[in-house]
Structures are given as structure tokens and as C-alpha cells.
């Protein structure tokens, strides 16, 4: 009987600790949940893929980061104002993007 009570207490303690860890999982910077972080990564990947497929943009020189709730930050260098504008348009066209912060620097 003592073993079964000990086993039940250990199981309850383990379950409680596991639930506590799962509920508290977040990315430290802005307390994103794991799901939000994964969604942001998917948006970032989709934007990078679209930039790579667009002949008017140089994806190698453009850095993409997704912040809270689909806000995409573009940084790096563009060869022209037209390329900078096009990169912003491409990013806005991706599903899940709610806002684009185009910080590309035009450097001929």
C-alpha cells in the first residue's frame, strides 16, 4: 500500500511539473509562446522563399525577421529604391504577414 501511495504521489508530481513547464514555455525576449515562435519562423521562411523566387530582389542581401503577430522586419541592403519597394511588396503578399517594417538601405 505504501508503494502505491508513493507511486501515485510521484506520478502526480511529475504530471504537475510537466504541465508547469509546458504552460510556461516561452521565448524570453517578448514572452512569445512556443506556438507564436514557430508561426513567426514559418512566416520568415515563407518571406525568404518569396524573395528568393522574385527576380527583382536579391534575397542574399535581405535579412528577414518576424516579430510579434506577423510583423516582418526587412533589413540589409537593396541595390535600388525599386528593389527596396519590391521587397516590401513581396513580404506583404505572404500569408500571415500583418505589417512590414522595411529598413532596407539603398546602396548602389
Image (cartoon, rainbow, N blue to C red):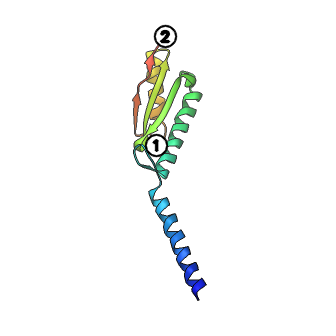
Residues packed near mark 2 inside 10 Å, few (<14), some (14 to 19) or many (20 plus): few
* 17, 96: nearer the viewer: 17
Q: Nearer the viewer, mark 2 or mark 1?
A: 2
Q: Quadrant of the N terminus?
A: bottom right
The residue identified by callout 2 is: 108
Residue at figure coordinates x 55%, y 74% from the top left: 10
Residue 96 on image: x %, y %: 46, 43
The residue identified by callout 1 is: 96
N-terminal of the two: label 2 or label 1? 1
Q: CA distance from mark 2 to mark 1?
A: 31 Å
Q: Compared with residue 2, is residue 57 higher up or lower down, i.e. above or below?
A: above
Q: In the rendered image, which quarter is residue 97 located in?
A: top left
6 sits left or right of 23 in the view: right
* 106, 57: nearer the viewer: 106
Residues packed near mark 1 inside 10 Å, few (<14), some (14 to 19) or many (20 plus): some
Residue 73 on image: x %, y %: 43, 32
Label 1: state its secondary structure. loop
Residue 22 on image: x %, y %: 49, 60
Q: Compared with residue 7, is residue 96 higher up or lower down, i.e. above or below?
A: above
Q: Compared with residue 95, is residue 61 higher up or lower down, i.e. above or below?
A: above
* 63, 28: nearer the viewer: 28
Residue 9 on image: x %, y %: 53, 77
Q: Are marks 2 and 1 in contact (CB under 8 Å)?
A: no
24 sits left or right of 56 in the view: left
Residue at figure coordinates x 49%, y 37% from the top left: 94
Amino acid at each position: 500500500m505504501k508503494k502505491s501511495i508513493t507511486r501515485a504521489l510521484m506520478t502526480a508530481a511529475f504530471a504537475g511539473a510537466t504541465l508547469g513547464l509546458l504552460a510556461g514555455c516561452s521565448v524570453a525576449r517578448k514572452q512569445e509562446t512556443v506556438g507564436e515562435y514557430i508561426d513567426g519562423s514559418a512566416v520568415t521562411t515563407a518571406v525568404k522563399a518569396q524573395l528568393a523566387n522574385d527576380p527583382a530582389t536579391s534575397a542574399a542581401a535581405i535579412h528577414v525577421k518576424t516579430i510579434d503577430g506577423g510583423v516582418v522586419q526587412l533589413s540589409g541592403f537593396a541595390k535600388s529604391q525599386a528593389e527596396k519597394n519590391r521587397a516590401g511588396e513581396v513580404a506583404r503578399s505572404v500569408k500571415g504577414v500583418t505589417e512590414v517594417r522595411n529598413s532596407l538601405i539603398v546602396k548602389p
